[in-house]
Image (cartoon, rainbow, N blue to C red):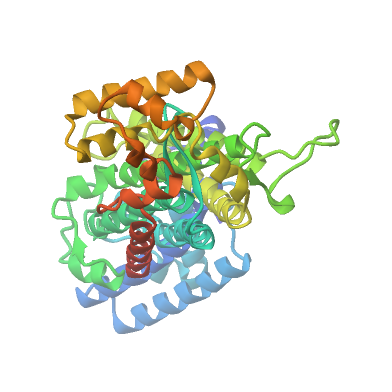
Amino acid sequence: MTVSLWGGRFTGGPSDALAALSKSTHFDWRLAPYDLAGSRAHARVLHRAGLLSDGHLEEMLDALGRLRTDVETGTFVPLESDEDVHTALERGLIERAGPDVGGRLRAGRSRNDQVAAQFRMYLRDQARLLGAKVLDVVQALVDQAAAHPDVAMPGRTHLQHAQPVLLAHHLQAHAWALLRDVERLVDWDRRAAVSPYGSGALAGSSLGLDPLSVAHDLGMPAASENSIDGTASRDFAAEFSFVLAMTGVDLSRLSEEVILWATAEFGFVTLDDAFSTGSSIMPQKKNPDVAELTRGKAGRLVGDLAGLLATLKGLPLAYNRDLQEDKEPVFDGVDTLEVLLPAVSGMVATLQFHEERLEELAPQGFSLATDVAEWLVREGVPFRVAHEVAGACVRACEERGIGLEDLSDADLASISEHLHPGVRSVLTVAGSLASRNAHGGTAPVRVTEQRAHLLKQVARL
Ligand code: ARG
């Protein structure tokens, strides 16, 4: 049976070319459970408004229940002739309840408010599922940090050795960024949990239906305050898409480091066999494909967001068919992260860190020069002078190919009157780390404390 939702004023059906262009069931079918839930809620609100008898409501809910089972088991699928998920399910309802009962459901609703509501409902579920998977990556980072609580590594700025930091501090920095992405999903949900049902095509309904009761029925605390906004706005989709892109970018920055760390030159980590790939020609290769695909897919997620914003930017109010293009980029983002996140958490959880290598490199590149300058400040020397003196130490060492800790008492005295052997107390990585003990610093005691704060936030989400 072909069910068209708008045949009345037309003398002929759509051309094949239009039907092919118009069709969206190949991507919007994933909204089917939400369409069915919306239909149940709509049947009940029609009944409450006196527009559906007790008997008709019962028949309608029974038919919708059978349709849901048939959708779940794959017995009911869209036909070539179904334009979208809403059309297909209306056909399914009419096939089960008959045209007299089934044909009553469309009163007071439009695909414009249906699709806007169902897109929100779908994304709200995805926000919870994806958020949990992002938290798995956070947990993997925190577990690695806890497994290597006192290992130092070279902290970098501009990718150059800067100051020693704890590996745990560095890993937890990635964890905080990802935690904020989960918080963004939670914040987003509060704004997204507003039901457009009742907005109709754009102007609201004349049938005395209560949109708020439908919203509550569907687990949303509020209904759209403005029916035009309810049907035409997609900032909820764009904002969601931004969070996916941001998550992709945060995962990509972590991945870029894993790629560098796994090179022979860095030698910081070995990837687990289960999370690396070989080469078809070079037998020795072990490639960080998970990290590279993450970096690559971050570009795709950014593209999804950019594409959606480009679709929205020129649209006058209210609904325009361009809005059918809103779903694929966001669905693509959801699907991308759904496969990416478990791979990233697995890769992180199985990274094998080379503690000796990290520790060996931590003091290199004169990364304790700042400690010399700050020691001088504690000795009462103005920082401007202290910076000069520490710089002169680096220059002297560089000329002679030695480290700061190799300067003799005489060397120190000849560089500056302010330098005395006491400075050696800060010329160790452990001393440097321990000294950075203010809130947020890399001192071991602070990093352990920080990890407890992180875990508390994870537990709250
Ligand atoms: N499938 C459409 C969408 O995704 C909803 C249908 C609205 N169509 C219409 N002619 N008003 O946006």
Residue 168 in view of the camera: yes
> Does 173 appear above or below 14?
below
Residue 264 x %, y %: 68, 34
Q: Quadrant of residue 388?
A: top left
**Image quarter of the N terminus:** bottom right
Residue depicted at x 65% and y 34%: 263
**Image quarter of the C terminus:** bottom left
Residue 291 x %, y %: 59, 41
> Does 93 appear above or below 184?
below
Residue 8 in view of the camera: no
Is residue 347 or residue 412 the one in the foreground? 412
Count of residue discs: 0
Residue depicted at x 54% and y 21%: 401
Is residue 128 or residue 121 the one in the foreground? 128
Q: Would residue 459 appear left or right of 137 to someone viewing this image?
A: left
Q: Would residue 146 appear left or right of 37 to someone viewing this image?
A: right
Is residue 315 or residue 12 the one in the foreground? 315
Residue depicted at x 22% and y 77%: 48
Residue 283 x %, y %: 86, 36
Residue 111 x %, y %: 35, 51
Is residue 205 or residue 11 the one in the foreground? 205
Question: Farthest residue toward the top?
Answer: 399
Question: Farthest residue toward the front?
Answer: 410
Q: Would residue 442 appear left or right of 405 to someone viewing this image?
A: left
Residue depicted at x 21% and y 36%: 377
